[in-house]
Amino acid sequence: MWVYWLIIILLAIVAELATINLVSIWFALGAAVALLADLLSVKQTVQILLFFVVSFIGIIVFLIVFRPRMQKAQGKLESTNADRIIGREAVVIKEIKPYENLGQIRVLGQIWSAVSVDEEESIPVDTKVKVVGIKGVRAEVCLLDE
């Protein structure tokens, strides 16, 4: 019977790796306990019962304890250092055109896609601008007050 438990363990692990959503790891855990019971010469009915009980307990513990923590952690924003460009001077390296979202700037040695906060006017290449915010993956810029 141990071969069947080993097959269940392998199938559950493969399914888990394919989905990465914690959907089948509980069955691998239950099969591992049943496999251990088989190696200890426990009756087959007890092995099957252990498989279902351990799998069920694993699912319940996950749903009650770990899933709420994971959802809470997913709701938190990961802080990055992207906001360090806000307030910095940048140079337009590809014309920023309103409504086209094609512009680019160089700031702190990095190239960023950029949009103008003044959506009515284009900003030509080599113009100095100030980064005033980040909108999605684009830097929001305005002309420098000179």
Image: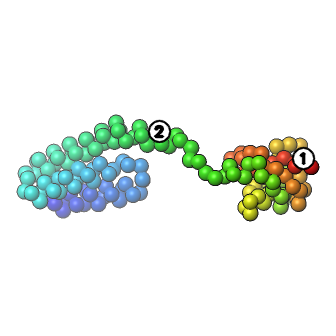
Nearer to us in this view, 36 or 70: 70
Is residue 32 visible in this depiction of the protein? yes
* Colour mapping: rainbow
Q: Count the numbered circles shown.
A: 2
- Locate residue 110: give its quadrant: bottom right
Q: Which one is in front in this view, the residue at disc 1 or the one at disc 2? A: 1
Is residue 100 visible in this depiction of the protein? no
Nearer to us in this view, 72 or 145: 145
Considering only order in the chain, which callout, 2 or 1, is on the residue closer to the N terminus?
2
**Residue at 10% over, 51% down:** 44
**Residue at 20% over, 57% down:** 5
Residue type at mark 2 is Lys
**Residue at 69% over, 51% down:** 84
- Residue for badge 1: 145
The image position of residue 28, as x and y in percent, is: 27, 53
Marks 2 and 1: in contact by CB < 8 Å? no
The image position of residue 48, as x and y in percent, is: 16, 48
Q: Secondary structure at mark 1?
A: loop
Nearer to us in this view, 51 or 134: 134
Nearer to us in this view, 89 or 39: 89
Decide: is 117 above or below 7.
above
Would residue 27 appear left or right of 37 to someone viewing this image?
right
CA gap, disc 1 and disc 2: 43 Å
Q: Quadrant location of the N terminus? A: bottom left
**Residue at 74% over, 45% down:** 133
Would residue 4 appear left or right of 89 to someone viewing this image?
left
The image position of residue 31, as x and y in percent, is: 22, 53
The label number, if any, that marks residue 72 in the structure image = 2
Residue type at mark 1 is Asp
Q: Secondary structure at mark 2?
A: helix
